Amino acid sequence: MDNPPVFEIELPSFQADVVERSRQVPVVVLFWTDQVAPAAETKAALERLAAQYQGKFALALSDVAKDQTLAQQLRVQGIPSIRVIQDGQLAEQIEGPQGEKVLRELIDRLTQSPSDMLKDQLAAHLQAEDFNGALEVLQQAIRAEPGNAAFKVEWADVLLIQGDLEGGRTVLAAIAEGVAERERPATRLALLEEAAGLGRLGDALAAVERDETDLDARYRAAILLTRERRYVDALEQAMAILQQDRQYRDDIGRVTMVRIMSLLEKGSNVAKQYRRRMFNFLH
């Protein structure tokens, strides 16, 4: 293998094996020795990451118990010690033992594109339902990549979640039909607009409690619960419509379930559960 992801390094080959190679991929240089337990643990963690990242970075190992020349040249003061070489330059240095989480964050910074990093930040804000933080990340992302339709889709969706229908509608109108995931904010907008004419959620739920066969009330409750992002409760109402009368309003129980599930994140366990329930009922 011409360029193994993990290799031993010494001073004579540093220029060719580290500096020149760093123009293709970042090179993490670890100064270590198995005589220092934290250093051996750091080496093991970096080797695991090198295997997982499959060539996105290279790991150069310098065992100071065998040769301290390179460590002296790079002014290493303690063990373990990390030097990151990227594009032929010293990009970062870290002293002392590091946990795998910190090392993974380091590798992500080195290997992810700015777009990927923004996507990760956005996902974290959305997971925490920090929608103001999500909007800040989206504005930054769109400035960096004004042609990236995926960011505009998320921007429209977050505006709609926050209740800014006019803003969401404006952003959505600027996204071409057929763009991946555009259906999500488009469906959310349609449901929010419909919810505006369906009265109060409390009244709809009270009507269902009085008469569980009142499918009009169940439908109103499903749409209004969706507006509140109470997706499980909304799906229960739509499922009840499907189970009681599939012909009601042209199979609107099933249609509503599909619309609600389209609002959930990819891989949602809730969506999987209700798709399975719907399938089992229909078949």
Image (spheres, rainbow, N blue to C red):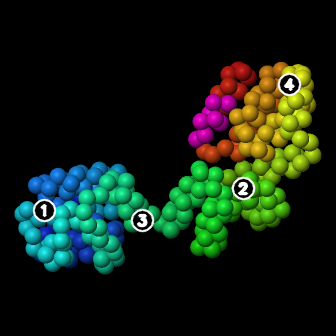
Real-space CA distance between mark 4 and mark 2, rounded to the nearest whole angstrom? 32 Å
Query: Which residues fall within the magenta stretch?
Result: 267-274
User: Would residue 204 be found to the left or right of residue 153 on screen?
Assistant: right
Quarter of the image for residue 132 reads bottom right
> Residue 127: x and y, percent?
59, 50
In this rendering, the label closer to the viewer, 4 or 1: 4
Dot 2 falls on a residue whose secondary structure is helix
Dot 4 falls on a residue whose secondary structure is helix
User: Residue sitting at 34 percent across and 58 percent down?
Assistant: 103
Amino acid type at circle 2 is Asp
Asked if the stretch drawn in magenta spans residue 47, the answer is: no
Circle nearer the N terminus (4, 1)? 1
* Label 3 close to label 1 by CB (< 8 Å): no
Asked if the stretch drawn in magenta spans residue 269, the answer is: yes
User: Would residue 131 be found to the left or right of residue 51 on screen?
Assistant: right
Q: Report which residue position mark 4 lands on.
A: 209
